[in-house]
Image: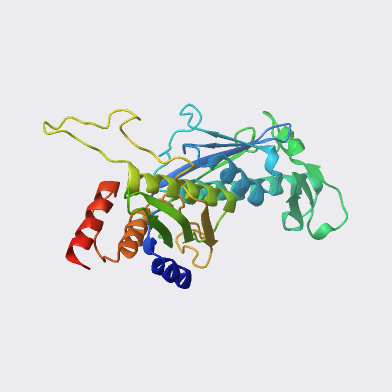
Amino acid sequence: MQTEQKQRRANGELIGAGVAMFVEKSGLGPFDDVRITVNTSGMVEVVTGAASVGQGVETVVAQICADTLGVRYDAINVIHGQTNRIARGLGAFASRVTVMTGEATRLAAIKLRDRILAIAAELLQSPAADLDIVDGLIVRSGGSAGPSIRLAQIAAALAPGSKLLGDDEPGLSAEASFESRHMTYPYGVHIAVVKLAADTGAVAIERYLVAYDIGKAVNPMLVNGQIVGGVAQGIGGALYEEFAYDDRGEPLSVTFADYLMPTSREVPDVEVIITEDAPSPLNPMGLKGAGEGGANAVGAAIASAIDNALGMPGAITRLPVMPQTIKALLKAKIESGA
């Protein structure tokens, strides 16, 4: 890439590359609660106080529950944002949902799994240690031959008045809370390649790359999507979205005709590399947050790339970088004979 850029600069193009490295804070506590219930049809319901803002919390929570409990992903329904269903919840912010709610889900699923196997052991007259749950069916572990029973049958056996209940409440459910006083720290690098238009001062992003270590990617496609969306947001802050005011302090950017935002035309294809080289030691799954890793280094990477294209290290000192800023810098460079 550097050889190509050198050749293009020799042909008069204003092209440059910039790099920005970052460490992110994520997984803010202090707690998250989850309740998991299996009904008499064998369907699993996960109730959480977390919030969905389009980041795919339903998918991630269902995946973690399915893997831990031993049921099919499509047998799980995730309920969130309903205060009449669960007492506590802190919402979605600080890249926290997968870390906090995900671990609470895993803990609740472990508790529920242990209870299911204990009840199944009594019904099947077999030690719980010899049983496993596979796609919602309790079977002998290791594929050994023997009787089996479905989760729906276990749930039905725990109806009110059942002798299996003992002192427990009717129904097949478990609750868990995950608490954490320390945040997790994902990290990554952004690389931007830009080309400047000498006549208009416009900045075109030719290539953009992000490498991000998330510790453990429960759903890599969701992580990729969040990073790409974050880059689009970061490009807006780096090049377009300016808060302008007049001399009296009145805002001038009050409509979308005055406040520019990037579209699919301005946002390039973002190349994303997701790594899992450094799992967090603060939760058993090694999870770190992904929500902000796509946005927070964009401004620095693009500013660095513009500096490189101008051949003026440290020239860009504020964002967004507007075309008039580029033209002024080019004019100053020509006048100085640099």
Of residue 20 and residue 25, the one placed in the foreground of this image is 20
Give coordinates of residue 258: x percent, y percent: 30, 32
| Extreme residue in the left direction | 248
Residue at the spot x=63%, y=32% of the render? 170
**Quadrant hosting residue 261:** top left
Residue at the spot x=55%, y=39% of the render? 35
Residue at the spot x=27%, y=32% of the render? 253
Query: In the figure, is residue 184 to the left or right of 314?
Result: right
Q: Is residue 78 visible?
A: yes
Give coordinates of residue 327: x percent, y percent: 26, 52
Of residue 209 and residue 334, the one placed in the foreground of this image is 334
Give coordinates of residue 183: x percent, y percent: 38, 56
Compared with 220, 73 (above or below) is: above
Number of marks: 0
Give coordinates of residue 168: x percent, y percent: 60, 37
Compared with 116, 143 (above or below) is: below
| Extreme residue in the bottom direction | 3
**Quadrant hosting residue 140:** bottom right
Query: In the figure, is residue 39 to the left or right of 57?
Result: right
Of residue 129 and residue 191, the one placed in the foreground of this image is 191
On the rendered image, what quadrant is the C terminus found in?
bottom left
